[in-house]
Image: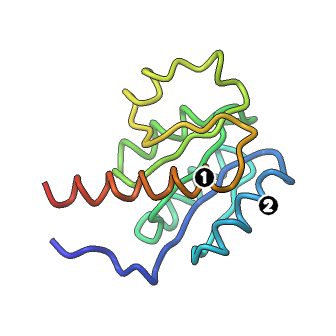
Amino acid sequence: MSRPDESKKTALVAEDDAIFRKVVVRGLQRHGYTVKEAINGAEGIRIFDESAGEITLIVSDIRMPEVDGVAFLNHVRSKSKVPFIVMTGYSEVVDKSDIFEIGATDLLAKPFNFDKLVESVERSLSAKAADLSA
């Protein structure tokens, strides 16, 4: 199976905190991603459904209004194995085993520096490549 074209990297970032979302978006853009933004899980689902074939990575907060990140992750997993990185400022109340069981690729506790996000993206994409070659 051929690998996706590396020049066509499109991330979807779902985060209700506008400032934090911009930081993540700008960082991903500096690393060559085209980025689509969602202000909550409901918008994330809509954008994913409209452009699922384009999305190569999802980074989403867990706690968001309307539809949370867990419901967003469940929706995505029902249709795709795209790498899905979960961010949370509430890591002490998030059951990590549940998040990974649902299908999250990685979990980042906020706040984090951008290097941690880059490491997570690289791990997630490596795991996806390993799944594709298996």
The residue under the point 76% across, 54% down is 21
Please provide percent x and percent y for residue 58. 53, 54
Please provide percent x and percent y for residue 131. 22, 52
Question: Which comes before the other along the chain, label 1 or label 2?
Answer: 2
**According to the image, what is the colour scheme of the structure?**
rainbow
User: Mark 2 sits on what residue?
Assistant: 22
Label 2: element kind:
helix
Type of residue at label 1?
Answer: Leu
Tag 1: Cα neighbours inside 10 Å, few (<14), some, or many (≥20)? many
Please provide percent x and percent y for residue 47. 58, 60
The C terminus lies in quadrant: bottom left
Q: How far apart are marks 1 and 2 (CA)?
A: 14 Å
Numbered mark located on residue 73 in the image? none
Q: Is residue 7 shown above or below 72?
A: below
User: Mark 1 sits on what residue?
Assistant: 117
Q: Quick check: 89 left or right of 76?
A: right
The residue under the point 20% across, 76% down is 2
Q: Do the residues labelled 1 and 2 touch (CB within 8 Å)?
A: no
Label 1: element kind:
helix
Occupied quadrant, residue 129: bottom left
Q: In front here: 18 or 74? A: 18
Find the residue positioned furthest to the right.
19
The residue under the point 69% across, 66% down is 27
Please provide percent x and percent y for residue 130. 23, 55
Type of residue at label 2?
Answer: Lys
Occupied quadrant, residue 109: top right
Q: In front here: 54 or 30? A: 30
The N terminus lies in quadrant: bottom left
